[in-house]
Amino acid sequence: MKAILARQFGGPDVLTLAEVPDPVAAAGQVRVRLHAVGVNPFDTYMRTGAYAIVPALPYTPGADAAGVIDQVGAGVTGRQVGDRVYISGTAQGKAQGAYASLAVCLETQVHRLPDRVSFAQGAGLFVPYVTAWCALFLRGQARAGDTVLIHGASGGVGVAATQFARAAGLTVIGTAGTDDGVAVVKTQGAHHVLNHGSEGYRDAIATLTGGRGPDLILEMLANVNLDHDLTLVAPGGRIVVVGSRSRVEIDARKIMFKGCVVTGLALWGIPADEVQRAHRAIEAGLEVGALTPVVGTEMPLADAARAHEQVMEPGARGKIVLIPGQ
């Protein structure tokens, strides 16, 4: 089969397309023929060797993908050949192994993909939607009637959070950095959409909330925004840091005076039972049509290096997806 291999840590150029032996499903496992593979920012961090998870070399990146089960190992009872599924990691590890044409997964790592959802959309489910659900409801304690600011609502996690929040009865303020991104957030149903590159957008957030501030802020770029978030958030509010690309300087007195809670979310540290709750929420949302992933760019699997460059560029617009068959 074809797979992307990183034989050393470094820049995007360490990712090369290789021919490797087809994997075989062992007991308790299934093999999935992948039709689409999702690209996430953490994939780029892991590739450098400086991430919290350091894989043994050589390794195949990727945790997100979707396809059809074509082999079932002994003892598997809940899945069968022909099932359309999205995956949450592979048997190689919860954060690697998906940049390939085939992947072997534990039975617990495959989840039903309804016919209404394309494989490309399915490749944008695991990391973004589990992260969004955990940020909103596990860490953020979101409740119907709350106002949530999703700071960076046009990327994979932001789109997912917007959809979950609307379905749960929250008032959503979403930001994006480009006109295209703003358009994406509007189509997801955010009540208010602002360009965070525009002067005065923070004043607009205060105005939209009657001067009180959002009850909850999901922050995708804390190194730029966190200190400002502490000014914006409502008294007693919550800020969940989902992403940060460097060290952060804040005025801690704002936390004291506001009595707010600042917490972080790393998907790999979430307890397994909570992750399974998130998957149940995803499957239900897909079934009733409340959740629909947005795909921004599709490219061949061989272009993984270019995808790693693009996913780190500003102006996110949906999910970047690699297609193994191209």
Image (tube, rainbow, N blue to C red):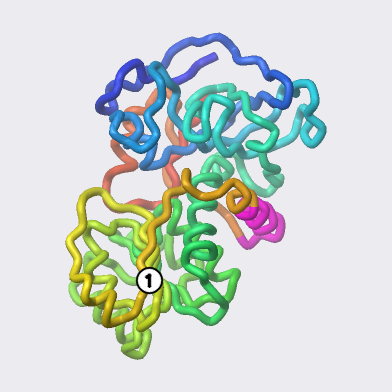
Q: Nearer the viewer, residue 67 or 75?
A: 75
Q: Residue at point 21% right, 57% down?
A: 248
47 with respect to 148 (left or right): left
| SS at badge 1 | strand
Question: Is residue 278 rendered magenta in the image?
Answer: yes
Instruction: Please name the residue that numbered disc 1 is placed on.
Output: 261
Q: From what the image shows, is residue 240 above or below residue 274?
A: below
Residue 277 at x, y = what percent? 64, 54
Residue 32: name its quadrant. Answer: top right
84 with respect to 23 (left or right): right
Q: Residue 326, can we see it? A: no
Q: Report the span colored magenta.
A: 277-290
Q: Main secondary structure of the magenta part?
A: helix
Residue 220 at x, y = what percent? 34, 57
Q: Residue 22, can we see it? A: yes
Q: Nearer the viewer, residue 320 or 179?
A: 320
Q: Amino acid at mark 1?
A: Val
Q: From what the image shows, is residue 307 above or below residue 319?
A: above
Residue 2 at x, y = what percent? 50, 16
Residue 236 at x, y = what percent? 39, 80
Q: Nearer the viewer, residue 204 or 279?
A: 279
Q: Residue at point 36% right, 38% down?
A: 52
Q: Residue at point 67% right, 42% down?
A: 111
